[in-house]
Amino acid sequence: MSLNPALLQPLPGAVLAALLAATPALPLAALAAAPSAAVSAAPTPTTPAVSASGFDRRRYTPAILRLSFSGNRSAAGEPGQGSFLDLTLVPLSGEPIGRRVPVNTSAFAALLRSLYGQLSRQAPLEVDNPRAPARQLYQLLLGPLVSDLERLGVTTLLVAAEPGLQAVPLAALHDGSRYFGERYAFSLTPAIGLTPLALPTTPPEARSLAAGASRFEGLAPLPLVPQELARIHQGSRVDRYLDRSFTPSVLVERLADPRVNRVHVATHAEFMPGGPSQAQLFTGTEPFPLARFAQLRQRRSDQPLDLIVLSACRTALGDRDSELGFAGLALQAGARSAVGTLWYVDDVATAAFFVQYYRYLERGMPKAEALQATRSAMASGAIRLQGGRVLGVEDQILLDDLSSSQQLRVADGLRHPFFWAGITMLGVPW
């Protein structure tokens, strides 16, 4: 399903206008003063904002990318044969750019199934082959705008994807040189018009919440959760609740506290087909219905949570109601950003990923850039097993005292996109 350049069309003006009608303007002045950390050497037009030398504030250039189907629809509203992919890029300044690509939806779905099959088996993605699913999906969804992204120096994308496109593992798509998740920082949103684009404000005496469970009845244990909770936040302004101290009432009360700004939850959860009413998260004492997350919006209307991270959560794919999983429910709760997983990943890899992620956040990186840097660290082998430890960037210890079985599960390394491409941010990337 390679993209034929002769078929590429500009997005019709009426369609472009309709897509932009619900797109708020990016907060230019605020984003120009994006959070800064270590500033690297002078950038070139193709230098990413995040590189081996740190985060370069001068290269921080966000944009909005809208992905949607148009054309023939079935009675149920699904895109049918004769459909198009409409791609719209809204930069910080200048005119929006639209592209329209004819797409065979059956072939598109087959490519997506094939890619998920490769990921689930940790099979080679064959990125040197232009016919590989990761390459073909990249060409369809991103290829038509590559030259525009490079010309504008875009480093960060807020991707507004309609149902049917939200479960595409964008980070695992490949352009023949690099994975999309390494090249760009990005987040997803199901509704751009309802996404708060302004920069976050930090409340006075802001605190973090770290909660999780490692032992369950009838479910596999998560023995690395204690280490994960202990290592993800440094400093004194963090409240930790582990196992029996992690109860539904604690979760509700602490999430409603306006001083709590960032939340990390590490536990089992299940998101079954059928939507939010079928989702539950396992605390250290009993299940917690995820539908209750939506009640938090009213209680925190004046001070939304900046970030919720849901680690070790399972999301059911293939069901339109559950395509955004737990992170989508966190957005319903009023969080500006939420991180969840498109598939279940081994707890060794997940714990190591998030410990490294928070190290980057503590350096002052924006949230999506910290994810990008962590993905790159895994893909490059900078996060690796050494003896009974998992070491991260600059040889910092992320996890230690791993059992022989835990070591065996990651003995072949963590470079494969299976370990890092499913961890996805929803909401605003900054």
Image (cartoon, grey):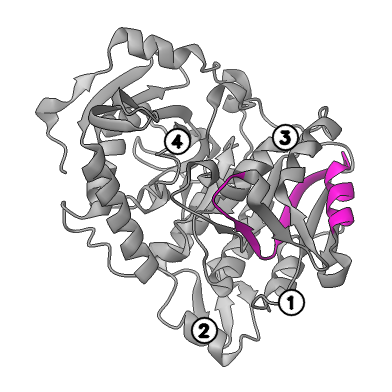
Amino acid of disc 1: Glu
Count of numbered badges drawn on the protein: 4
Percent coordinates x, y for residue 115 in the rendering: 31, 57
Q: From the image, tell me which residue sits under label 3.
A: 334
Crowd tier of the residue under label 2, counting other residues whose Cα lies within 10 Å: few below 14, some 14–19, many 20 or above: few
Q: Which one is in front, 296 or 137?
A: 296
In the image, the segment drawn in magenta is 248-275
Sequence-wise, the earlier of marks 3 and 1 is 1
> The N terminus is located in which quarter?
top left
Say which residue appears at 52% left-offset and 49% top-offset. Answer: 424
Query: Is 93 located above or below residue 404 in the figure?
Result: above
User: Please, what secondary structure does the residue beneath circle 1 have?
Assistant: loop
User: Please, what secondary structure does the residue beneath circle 4 have?
Assistant: loop
Q: From the image, tell me which residue sits under label 4.
A: 163
Q: Which one is in front, 235 or 289?
A: 289
Q: Is residue 80 left or right of residue 255?
A: left
- Does the stretch in magenta take in 205? no
User: Please, what secondary structure does the residue beneath circle 3 have?
Assistant: loop
Percent coordinates x, y for residue 324 in the rendering: 54, 44
Query: Is 414 located above or below residue 279 in the figure?
Result: below
User: Please, what secondary structure does the residue beneath circle 2 have?
Assistant: strand
Query: In this rendering, which labeled residue sits more in front, label 3 or label 1?
Result: 1
Percent coordinates x, y for residue 420 in the rendering: 47, 60
Q: Residue furthest bottom?
A: 404
Q: Is residue 244 left or right of residue 421?
A: right
Amino acid of disc 4: Pro
Q: From the image, tell me which residue sits under label 2.
A: 386
Answer whether labels 3 and 1 touch (C-beta < 8 Å). no
Crowd tier of the residue under label 4, counting other residues whose Cα lies within 10 Å: few below 14, some 14–19, many 20 or above: some
Q: From the image, tell me which residue sits under label 1.
A: 217
Amino acid of disc 2: Gln
Q: Which one is in front, 312 or 363?
A: 312
